[in-house]
Image: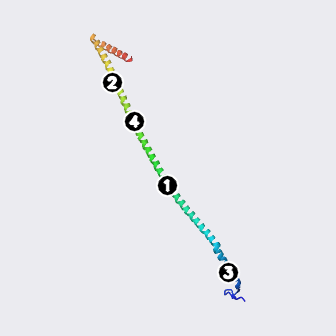
Amino acid sequence: MTPMYLLAADRIPVEVQLISLITTIVVFLLFFFVAAYLVWPKILAGLDEREQKIRREIESAEAARAEAAESLQRQEEELNEARRQATAMVAQAKADAEQHAAELRRKAESDLHSMREQASKEIRAAKESAISELNAQAAGLATSIAGRILQREISVDDQRDLIDESLRSFAATHEN
């Protein structure tokens, strides 16, 4: 006869068969030991392998991230250096252009000064030449007038005629 136990909560009789219970426990223990020696090591090895693979991937990703950050920093430094060099080149080009412009200004001013001096010398020479020519003609005219005056005694009408004739002679000389 099998014992009968009553559940306190339901007060329903539960029949427990001892042979079934023992058989179930033995089968469970047998399955547990077979699984513990044959299945669990494979499952645990697979889990360990997967964990190591995930760790390697995480380490690889961390290394790649660190390398990318380092590469980004290098690129930023190179970009900053390139900007600095470009700024320096622009500043140098501006300085060179300003220096060249100043040189051209000095040369132009020097050439202009030389041209003014040359023109001034030419004007002075032409003026002196004209004055000396005018003096020479005036002296010749005065000599001519004086010679005519000495050759004869001159009346007022003769003086006017002599002056008119001298002026005509002077005008004819200048026209040629």
Q: Which of marks 4 and 1 is nearer the N terminus?
A: 1
Depth check, mark 4 against mark 1: the one in front is 1
Q: Looking at numbered disc 1 in the image, what kind of residue is underneath it?
A: Arg
Q: Residue furthest top?
A: 152
Q: Is residue 44 above or below residue 131?
A: below
Q: Earlier in the sequence, mark 4 or mark 3?
A: 3
Using residue 148 as the reference point, say whether residue 69 is left or right of it: right
Q: Looking at numbered disc 2 in the image, what kind of residue is underneath it?
A: Glu
Q: Quadrant of the N terminus?
A: bottom right
Instruction: Give the residue drawn at x 55%, y 61%.
Output: 60
Query: Counting other residues with Cα less than 10 Å from the Cα at mark 4, is it few (<14), some (14-19), or many (20 or more)?
Result: few
Q: Looking at numbered disc 4 in the image, what kind of residue is underneath it?
A: Lys
Q: Mark 4 points at which residue?
A: 107
**Rendered image: mark on residue 74:** 1
Nearer to me, 24 or 103: 24
How far apart are the two marked residues, 1 and 3, measured between alpha carbons?
68 Å
How far apart are the two marked residues, 4 and 1, measured between alpha carbons?
49 Å
Q: Looking at numbered disc 3 in the image, what kind of residue is underneath it?
A: Val
Q: Name the residue under label 3.
A: 26
Contact (Cβ within 8 Å) of mark 1 with mark 3: no
- Callout 4: helix, strand or loop? helix
Q: Earlier in the sequence, mark 1 or mark 2?
A: 1
Q: Name the residue under label 2.
A: 128
Q: In this view, does 23 lie above or below 165?
A: below
Instruction: Give the residue drawn at x 39%, y 37%.
Output: 106
Depth check, mark 1 against mark 3: the one in front is 3
Depth check, mark 2 against mark 3: the one in front is 3
- Callout 1: helix, strand or loop? helix
Depth check, mark 1 against mark 2: the one in front is 1
Instruction: Give the residue drawn at x 57%, y 64%.
Output: 56
